[in-house]
Amino acid sequence: MTTTPSAHRGGLAHGLALLCQTLCMWAERFAMLMLMAMTALIVLQVLGRNLLGVGWPWAEELARYAGLALVYLGAPVLLMQNKHILVDIVSSRVKGLAKRWLNAINEALVLFFCVLFLWGGWAFLKRAGKFSTPALGIPNTLYYMPALLGMALLALVSLHRFILLLVVLKTPMQPAEAGAAS
């Protein structure tokens, strides 16, 4: 996503950028802790099964939790850093104003998906939250909370990116950009 320097100035866009950067920094740190925990738990499981002939269901459950947290808290970090997976079959061929519009529409769709996921996730947790995990008895609401928090942060980052793209849409095109459109 390319933005002009003026897109980073201003009240809402600037405040939202700082909020997203700060939250993503903490999400990244927590995700890294979850990666270390998941790795340690899996190694513990392998050693326990192969050397001691013992399996620990609690370790597997915690490793799954760490993996869930890693994925859902890592996604907004990658989006904020523009390092997410990108399929650009169409967008790489579009230039000028059409590319700006395509980027804005794409980000709006990402934001829409986030809202749908949060809505569906909340509906799921209203039912599943009545139960706990089998090995440790962790309430499902707590167990699946990283998915909802990560998706909420992804929505916030997507909103930030969408606002920046709207600012870029209002910005006059540079001569090189306008020439590429023809």
Image: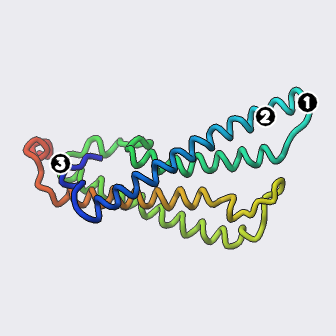
The answer to whether residue 168 is above or below residue 91 is: below
How many neighbours does mark 2 have within 10 angstroms: few (below 14), some (14-19), or many (20 or more)?
some
Relative horizontal placement of residue 144, taking residue 48 as reference (left or right)? left
Q: CA distance from mark 3 to mark 1?
A: 63 Å
Amino acid tagged 2? Leu
At 66% from the left and 68% from the top, the residue drawn is 125
Q: CA distance from mark 2 to mark 1?
A: 11 Å
Residue 122 on image: x %, y %: 60, 69
Colouring used for the render = rainbow
Q: Which residue corresponds to mark 1?
A: 52
How many neighbours does mark 1 have within 10 angstroms: few (below 14), some (14-19), or many (20 or more)?
few
Q: SS at mark 2? A: helix
Relative horizontal placement of residue 11, taking residue 120 as reference (left or right)? left
Relative horizontal placement of residue 9, taking residue 105 as reference (left or right)? left
At 40% from the left and 49% from the top, the residue drawn is 80
Amino acid tagged 1? Leu
Q: Of label 2 and label 1, which has the lower sequence position?
A: 2
Relative horizontal placement of residue 49, taking residue 28 as reference (left or right)? right
Residue depth check, mark 3 versus mark 1: number of the one nearer the observer:
1
Q: Which residue corresponds to mark 2?
A: 44
Q: SS at mark 1? A: helix
The answer to whether residue 66 is above or below residue 136 is: above
How many neighbours does mark 3 have within 10 angstroms: few (below 14), some (14-19), or many (20 or more)?
some
Mark sitting on residue 77: none
Q: CA distance from mark 3 to mark 2?
A: 54 Å
Residue 163 on image: x %, y %: 29, 61
At 66% from the left and 46% from the top, the residue drawn is 66
At 59% from the left and 46% from the top, the residue drawn is 70
Q: SS at mark 3? A: helix
Mark sitting on residue 96: 3
Amino acid tagged 3? Gly
The quadrant holding residue 50 is top right
